[in-house]
């Protein structure tokens, strides 16, 4: 039986999403490598409650101004959950407008802890329901780069990022 991580990575690759993995100790280097500057982001403590890692040692401007957001090429956020069978990311919304950081840029870099990968949408929705009930929060479920074929040919980046890169932070590494 295929592991939930392998299933998730396969679904991401089928969507044209770049995926890499790193131990937490090397996360700053992985983020630095994945971004194209200028880059903006929302701290992982805000998006996924990860107090251990800060974006301050990367080329990412945290809590950007509207001008910095408009000029950014890359947006960096945490992802609350990964959905194995679809390659979807659950992105929680914050007071710092994390949804803008993930949607208004050409390239979205999402940081996801390996233990937060769920095997399927049913499991992810059940966990998300529990989280929404406890926090009264809201979230976006994003699957791959933005794309539309409403007017004929497929267009990428019409309503969000043209590229997505997921960095999986490995358990116990």
Image: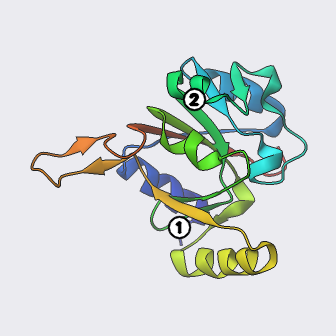
First in sequence: mark 1 or mark 2?
A: 1
Determine which of the numbered discs, if any, sits on residue 2 in the image: 1
Q: Which residue is mark 2?
A: 69
Q: What kind of element bears circle 2?
A: helix
Q: Residue at x 12, y 50 (%)?
A: 151
Label 2 CA crowd tier, 10 Å (few <14, some 14–19, many 20+): many
Q: Residue at x 58, y 49 (%)?
A: 99
Q: Position of residue 110 (x, y in %)?
A: 61, 43
Residue 3 falls in image quadrant: bottom right
Residue 35 falls in image quadrant: top right
Label 1 CA crowd tier, 10 Å (few <14, some 14–19, many 20+): few
Q: Position of residue 119 (x, y in %)?
A: 58, 71
Q: Residue at x 25, y 51 (%)?
A: 148
The relative height of residue 14 versus residue 36 in the rendered view (above or below) is below
Of 141 and 135, which appears nearest the observer? 135
In 3D space, how far apart are the residues under numbered discs 1 and 2 (Cα atoms)? 39 Å
């Amino acid at each position: 039986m295929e592991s939930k991580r392998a299933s998730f990575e396969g679904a991401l690759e089928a969507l044209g999403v770049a995926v890499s993995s790193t131990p937490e100790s090397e996360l700053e280097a992985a983020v630095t490598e994945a971004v194209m500057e200028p880059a903006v982001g929302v701290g992982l403590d805000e998006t996924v409650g990860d107090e251990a890692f800060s974006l301050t040692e990367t080329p990412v401007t945290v809590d950007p101004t509207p001008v910095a957001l408009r000029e950014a090429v890359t947006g960096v956020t945490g992802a609350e959950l990964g959905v194995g069978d679809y390659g979807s990311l659950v992105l929680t919304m914050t007071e710092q407008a994390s949804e803008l950081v993930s949607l208004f840029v050409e390239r979205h870099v999402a940081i996801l802890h390996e233990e937060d990968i769920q095997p399927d949408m049913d499991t992810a929705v059940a966990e998300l329901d529990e989280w929404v009930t406890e926090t009264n929060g809201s979230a976006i479920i994003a699957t791959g780069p933005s794309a539309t074929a409403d007017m004929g040919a497929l267009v990428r980046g019409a309503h969000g990022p043209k590229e997505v890169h997921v960095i999986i932070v490995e358990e116990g590494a």
